[in-house]
Image (cartoon, rainbow, N blue to C red):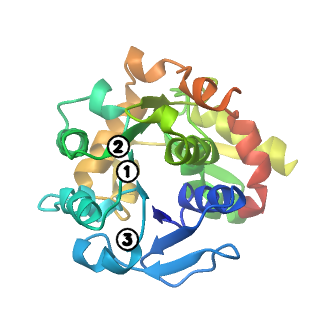
Amino acid sequence: MIVVTGATGNIGRPLTQALAEAGGQVTAVSRHTAAVPDGVRHVVADLAEPAGLKPALAGAKALFLLLSGDLHAAGANPADIIGEAAAAGVRRIVLLSTQGVVTRPAGRTRIAMRALEDVLRESGLEWALLRPGGFASNALWWAESVRTRQVVAAPFGDVGLPVIDPTDIAEVAAACLLDDLHTGGVYELTGPEVISPRQQAAALAAALDSPVRFHELTRDEARAGMSRSMPVELADDTLDILGSPNPAELRVSPDVQRVLGRAPRPFADWAARNVAAFR
């Protein structure tokens, strides 16, 4: 049995599907009732209360651990989840970490994530670490404005990053959960090219076959919007990267190719597959 947390999100959903198609027994964990692929067990649980994961972890051999936003906040203790997994007999954990633990190690959220990585390394369990950069799916923040006003509003319009398709993250995670070859692996995950918000808007326009205007937000405007869905400190950390990426954050990593034997998908591919969200 493999347990997938965050199973209804942009990574968890394709990961659950990939594992089910591989023929494994899968338990999908989310905070709310949701549809899951045929044959997949669904358990409602809140990772902020690790003891509540016991029913999901019973009989599991592997766990994909994706932290929700509140588990990045001050006072959260996600290391307890690793303890619950070990106590339940889980043998392998694949942790979704972040590129920032290396590229910006001084940030509070990065310090906390690196500490969680260290807990996992020292747990005695098999492990793999996934460290993605920016997600292509962050473009979904613009879905409503594109649908209603044909506009993408974002800060730092001409500053690019090699954003990664969450489906690529999911496929790397599936490989790490299923194959002993990746035990102890640390994978930095990026897309195949640096692409700016303005260029992403153009890719969405191409996918829609309709004009999309780009409107540049100030940092303060962007911070106010982001803070409605994530801790303020995490919003500030994210904006630091979006506005002034360092050379390590601009690097296109070979790790998706190493794990999957193919190049990562470009943003235009993500836009074409998700175009319905913007119509």
Say which residue appears at 54% left-offset and 59% top-offset: 12
Q: Is residue 58 above or below residue 191?
A: below
Q: Which mark is residue 126?
A: 2
Amino acid type of the residue that numbered disc 3 sits on in the rendered structure: Leu
Q: Which mark is residue 34?
A: none
Q: Residue 42 at x, y = what percent? A: 53, 79
Q: Are marks 1 and 2 in contact (CB under 8 Å)?
A: yes
Element under disc 2: strand
Q: Which mark is residue 93?
A: 1
Question: Spatial distance from mark 1 to mark 3, Cα to Cα?
Answer: 12 Å
Amino acid type of the residue that numbered disc 1 sits on in the rendered structure: Ile
Q: Nearer the viewer, residue 116 or 174?
A: 174
Q: Is residue 125 above or below residue 181?
A: below
Q: Earlier in the sequence, mark 1 or mark 2?
A: 1
Q: Residue 22 at x, y = what percent? A: 69, 55
Q: What is the total number of numbered labels drawn onto the structure image?
A: 3
Circle 1 crowding by C-alpha within 10 Å: few under 14, some 14–19, many from 20: many
Q: Residue furthest right?
A: 209
User: Which quadrant holds the C terminus?
Assistant: bottom right
For label 3, the residue is: 57
Q: Is residue 171 above or below residue 83?
A: above
Question: Spatial distance from mark 1 to mark 2, Cα to Cα?
Answer: 6 Å
Element under disc 3: helix
